[in-house]
Every structure is written in C-alpha cells, then in structure tokens.
Image (cartoon, rainbow, N blue to C red):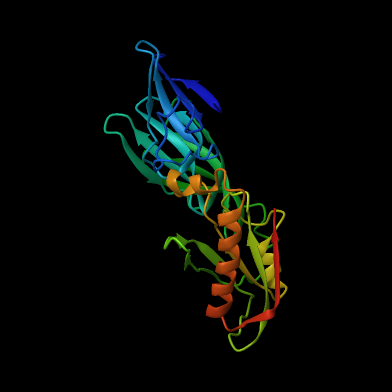
Amino acid sequence: MNAAEWSPDGRQLLLTGSPDLFGTLGWNVPDGMAPNDYDGQAYLYDLETKTATAITRDFDPAVDNATWSHDGSAIYLSVGEKEFQRLYRYTLKDRRFQRIDTGVDVLNTVDFARHQPLAVYYGSSVSTPHRAYFIDLSKQRYRVLADPEAEGFRTVDFGEVKPWTFQNARGETIDGRVYYPPNFDPNRQYPCIVYYYGGTSVVTRDFGGRYPKNLFAAQGYVVYVLQPSGAPGYGQAFSAYHVNDWGNIVAEEIISGTKAFLDAHPFVDKSRVGCIGA
C-alpha cells in the first residue's frame, strides 16, 4: 500500500497500492502471469461492509496518486499514461474516467483546494520548461501562474520531436519518439543516442532532467527514446512482461528496435550510435 485517505463523509477509504494490495482483486493479467507491483492501482474500501473495490483494475494508466474531490463525488487521479503523466477524474456515480487537460505532457505535482473545485500544479512538456499553473476543475480551464524559465529560453531554438514506433516479436506496438537537432537537414549524416530505461519504467516527456534529450539534440545528435515491454502505463498485461523475465524481453526489443530505427532513418550514421539509460 502506498497511501490511504478518508472520504469526506468518513464512510470509505481511498487507497493506492499495487495490484496485489487485496490479493488478486486488483489483477488484470492473462493466466499464468503475475502483475507488476509498479503498476499502481486505486481502491475503495467500505468501512461498514469491510469490502474493497478495485476501481482502476480495467483502467490502463498506472496510478501514482489519488485524492477525493472536495464534495466526495469524485476522485482525482495522477497517473502515468504511456509517455505522459496526466490527471483524471473518476466520478463515483457513473464510474467514469475523464481526462482533464492540464496543458502539460508531464504533470509533476498537484495540490487541490479543500472547499472548491480548484487546484494548482506544475509540469513540463517535451520542449517546454517547467511552469506553475492554476486550474478550475469544474470548467477545465487553466492558466499559467509562473514561467520562471521563460527568459532563459527566449532565444533558444528547439528541434522537432516526433513519434516513432515499431512492432516487436509478439506483434505489439512499442512506442518511441525521436528528438531532431535544430535546423535538421535530412541530407546530412547524424550520430545517434539511444535512450531507454530497462528497469522497466516509461521515459516520460518531461523537460530537462539528468538526461536532457533536447540538449543532446542541440549538440548535433539524433536521440531515439523507446519504451520496452514491461513499462507501466500501458495496462497490466503489458507491464507484467517484466515480472520474472530478468531483462530478456527488454534486451531483445532494445536491440531489434534500434536496428529497425536505423534502417528506417537513413540520415543516422550507423557507425556512430551510442546508448544511455539508468
């Protein structure tokens, strides 16, 4: 279990944790597979009946955090959804998930008002530095509160970032994206950096960090980021591939995916390819 929060009426607990939190209640994997403990789930626990409900069992994004709405009619979920970190609202009455547009690719931290449907948060996007925002959750309207890095990046040109996918040995689509150098010329030959997290976790679309892909691209590299099998945020069946596999699936996909990427992009110099990751 990661966290627990009382409902506003004191009748239920909202809990977050692994698919194993209540035995197999939260499992959604094929027979013979075990779920990935990092594929976060949310549960409701009724204090009177002492029964739990796995509210995100059939919801593919992985739950990072969850909190009640101010009136107890809904639950807000911060989730990892493929390459994105997003905000969802789960309405208890109709059991429906609704994605809330926050204007960022990666929502880092959000704080909700106690008595109104309002929140503040900060986040970034693949080529946009971190900003702070205010959002009216009832109207789904947001605005920028602070953009502290605007002046520093005012004269900086970013290259394009484009999606690129391939089919793995099982016929499944493996997501990825490519960072292009500014003033990219397809007639040139560029060295390439391949970035992956073999852990496995998704490499999100946040800006900067310890491995600033935009900066590498600005130095004249094409940067290819791929999301191997086993990463949470694509559904429990996908993240379960990593359990007890010890990297066999991941290693094969990184190698075959890189080869497919190089074959599909003739402007990348195959003799100058490096890899990074953590």
Relative placement, left or right, of 194 versus 236 is right
- Quarter of the rendering occupied by the N terminus: top right
Counting labels gives 0
Q: Residue 118's x, y, as percent?
A: 45, 35
Between 197 and 146, the one lying in front of the other is 197
| 50 vs 163: above or below | above
Residue 74 visible in the displayed image? yes
Identify the residue at image location x=50%, y=48%: 241
The image quarter in which residue 7 lies: top left
Q: Residue 266's x, y, as percent?
A: 58, 84
Between 250 and 106, the one lying in front of the other is 250
Identify the residue at image location x=41%, y=20%: 45
The image quarter in which residue 42 lies: top left
Q: Residue 77's x, y, as percent?
A: 45, 37
| 227 vs 26: above or below | below
Identify the residue at image location x=48%, y=32%: 66
The image quarter in which residue 98 lies: top left
Q: Residue 217's x, y, as percent?
A: 67, 71
Q: Residue furthest bottom?
A: 187
Q: Residue furthest front?
A: 32
Residue 117 visible in the displayed image? no
Relative placement, left or right, of 31 versus 249 is left
